[in-house]
Amino acid sequence: MAMGCEAEISQFVRDTWSSLLGMKASPTDKPFVPNGKDNTLAGCVQITGEWQGTITLYAPEEIGKKVASAIYGLDEVEVSDQQIQDVIGEVANILAGNIKSLFPPPCSLSLPSVIVTDYNLHPTGSQTLTAVNFDCEGLAFLVVILQENAK
């Protein structure tokens, strides 16, 4: 896959947010910046095979609460930290499965992992292939594709 897959990523995110969560997510030029007071969740899925890299969904805890609320049918104040982390991992997994289709086969997905972070995971030996910022109900989130450098 060449750079310039932002349109496909945007479509995958819009479709996932709409069909799974019943919410609208739109690409934005406004960059995702952690606010410093809330946790940032990073849902990561590795792709291995013909193409190797990592798909990461960065989202503030507030987005995690909205997503968990939609999935579990609970009020935002009722969702647990574990439920929030589970749904961020699952959404990252769904996005990674869609994004994987942009790469030459065969490729496999790892299980998703979720990290509570101050943002910006960057595995050694990788470079950013693309990053797309999104807005959902006034809250920003980010999808990043990191490609492992050829050995």
Image: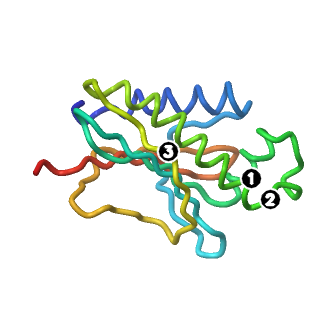
- Cβ–Cβ below 8 Å for labels 1 and 3? no
Report which residue position mark 1 lands on.
83
Q: Is residue 81 left or right of residue 58?
A: right
Residue 122 percent across, percent down from the top left: 34, 62
Which label number is shown at residue 16?
none
Name the residue at 32% across, 44% down: 130
Examine the rendered structure and indicate whether residue 122 appears above or below residue 70: below
Element under disc 1: helix
Which residue is identified by label 2? 80
Indicate the amino acid at tag 2: Ser
- The numbered mark, 1 or 3, whose residue comes first in the sequence reads 1
User: Residue placed at 89% from the left, 49% from the top?
Assistant: 75
Q: Viewer-proximal residue, 115 or 3?
A: 115
Name the mark on residue 111.
Answer: 3
Q: Quadrant of the N terminus?
A: top left
- Left or right of residue 21, residue 73 in this image: right
